[in-house]
Amino acid sequence: MKVCAVIPVYNHGEAVGAVVKAVRGHGLPCVLVDDGSEPGCAAVLDGLAREDSEHVAVVRLPQNEGKGGAMMAGLRAALERGYSHALQIDADGQHNANDIPRFLALAKSQPDTLVCGTPVYDESVPKGRLYGRYATHIWVWINTLSFAIRDSMCGFRVYPLKPTVALIDSVKIGKRMDFDVEVLVRLFWRGMHILNQPTQVRYPTDGISHFDVLWDNVRISGMHARLFFGMLGRLPVLLWRKVAK
C-alpha cells in the first residue's frame, strides 16, 4: 500500500502551507492541484514544491475547473506516480490532520474499501450549510438504498486509486462541489464498501469558502435527480445486495 495526499487548491495561499506541513508530519507525500489560482497562491505552491521537491508535487490546471475537476486531475496524477491510495484533504485547514493515522489504519486494514470522514462540527459551522447537508444525506440513502454512507459531503477520505480512476475515466462526474457526493454514490453502486471515520471539522481558517450557495445547490440538486434515475436502473442489483447480506 503506497499512499499520498491529494490536495485541491484554489486561492488558499495563506492556509495551504500549514496543511502541507501537517500532512507531511504524518509521512505522506503531497500532490497539490493548482485549480487556476491567482499568481500569489500559485507562487506559494511552487515554493512548497521547491522546499521539498522529493515529497511535494504541483499539478497545474490552466483554468479553474472546480473542486471535482481538481480532484480528478490529482487522483489521475497520483495513480500515474505509482500510488495505490490517495488521501483527500482540503487546503483551507478545516480538516483535522491529526486524524490521518486513523484513516490510514482503516485503509490498510481493508485496502479495497473507501474510508470516508463523518464530520463532528464545532460552533464555526454555518447553520445553513449544516441543514443543507441533511437533505443530501436523505437523497444519498435513497439513491443507494443503504445507510452505509454516513456523510457524503466530507472531503476528507482515502480512495483506492485503481477503481476510483477507472470510474472517473468511464463516467461523467460533476466537477464542482457535487463531485464528493457523486463519486461516493457511484463507487458504492460498483460494489465498493465504505468505512466511516468520525473526524472534527471546522470552517476555514483563512475565511475563504468557494461554495456558491445558489449555483452549487442547483448543481447538487441536478446531481441528485440524475443519481435517482440511475438508481432506478440499478434497483434489482441494489435490492439483491441487501437481501444477500
Image (spheres, rainbow, N blue to C red):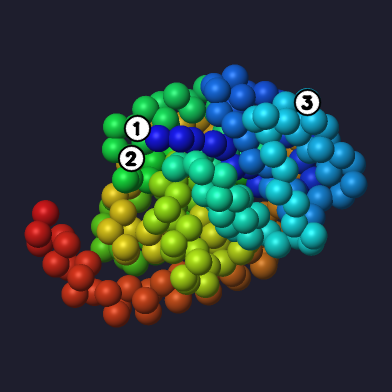
Image position of 10 with respect to 123: above or below:
below
Which quadrant would residue 111 be assigned to in this image?
A: top left
Q: With 205 as the anchor, is 137 left or right in this view?
A: left
Tell me the residue at 42%/30% (across/down). Answer: 104
Q: Earlier in the sequence, mark 3 or mark 2?
A: 3
Residue located beneath label 2 in the image: 111
Q: Residues within 10 Å of mark 1 (few under 14, many from 20)?
A: some
State the residue position of label 1. Answer: 108
Note whether 167 is above or below 231 in the view shown: above
Q: Residue at position x 17%, y 62% from top?
A: 241
Q: Is residue 52 above or below residue 142?
A: above
Q: Amino acid at mark 3?
A: Glu
Snapshot quadrant of residue 216? bottom right
Q: Residue at x 55, y 23 (%)?
A: 27
> Could you say where residue 226 lies in the image, as x and y percent from the top left?
45, 76
> Could you tell me residue 228's position as x and y percent?
38, 74
Q: Quadrant of residue 113?
A: top left
The amino acid type, in three-letter code, at marker 2 is Pro
Q: How far apart are the alpha carbons under marks 2 and 1? A: 5 Å
Q: Which residue is mark 3?
A: 51
Residue 6's tag is none
Type of amino acid at the residue the image marks with label 1: Lys
Residue at the spot 83% in from the left edge and 44% down from the top edge: 42
